[in-house]
Amino acid sequence: MKYAVAVLTISNQGSKSESSDKCGKIIIEMLKAHSFEVVKYEIIPSEFSLIKEKLIKYSDELRVNMILTSGGTGFSSWDITPEATEEVIEKKVPGIPEAMRSEGFKSTKKAMLSRNIAGIRGKTLIINLPGSSRGVQESLEAVIEELSRGLNMILRIQN
């Protein structure tokens, strides 16, 4: 089964076309290599209400199976992606960000500074990824093999 995925990059500069979105491109290529179908891709500024609005729209209206965000998981004042995500999810899935941080920690101790979270809203799995190319790739590599199993559980499909 192909799962429908939305990729949402949260970047103040990227939303103004001031920089290219390497992270979003990495996510899309990795998803395609694992038979996921990217049905929506967007770059938005780091605005709390806008992040929430997009997560709700993709989950409730587009009914995607999974949303992967990139960016906004650091320590700066504009890093608000986890807080916006937390307001829209119904269940937390702590194992996903734990696995991502654990894998990232093998190559850099900076991984412990990521505040990414994961959770479920209705039938949609939402995962926050870092805003660096290396962080996105390492984080997604750490969990991508098991994402289909998690989506099957959300959709109650037997393996």
Image (cartoon, grey):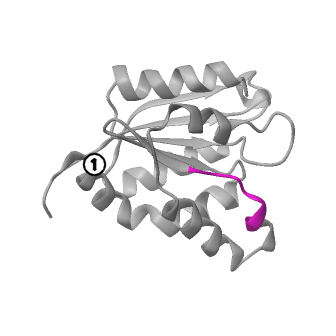
Q: Left or right of 55: which side holds 59?
A: left
Q: Which residue is drawn at 23% across and 54% down?
A: 152
Rate crowding at label 1 as few (under 14), some (14 to 19) or many (20 or more) other CA atoms within 10 Å. some
Q: What range is drawn magenta here?
A: 111-117
Task: Residue lying at the far left in this picture: please name it.
Answer: 158
Task: Give the residue pinned by disc 1.
Answer: 154
Name above or below for residue 142 compared with residue 17. Answer: below
Does residue 116 show up magenta in the picture?
yes
Q: In which quarter of the image is residue 100?
A: bottom right
Q: Position of residue 1 (x, y in %)?
A: 18, 50
Q: In which quarter of the image is residue 120?
A: top left
Q: Where is residue 128 in the image (x, y as percent from the top left)?
A: 58, 47
Of residue 123 and residue 21, the one placed in the foreground of this image is 123
Q: Which residue is drawn at 31% across and 38% down?
A: 123
Q: Residue at x 32, y 57 (%)?
A: 150
Q: Where is residue 11 in the image (x, y as percent from the top left)?
A: 73, 33
Task: Residue lying at the far bottom in this picture: please name it.
Answer: 106
Of residue 93 and residue 18, the one placed in the foreground of this image is 93
Q: Where is residue 99 in the image (x, y as percent from the top left)?
A: 55, 69
Name above or below for residue 63 compared with residue 83. Answer: above
Q: Left or right of 129: which side holds 27?
A: left
Q: Residue at x 47, y 47 (%)?
A: 119
Q: Which amino acid does label 1 sit on?
A: Ile
Q: In the rendered view of the protein, which quadrant contains the C terminus?
A: bottom left
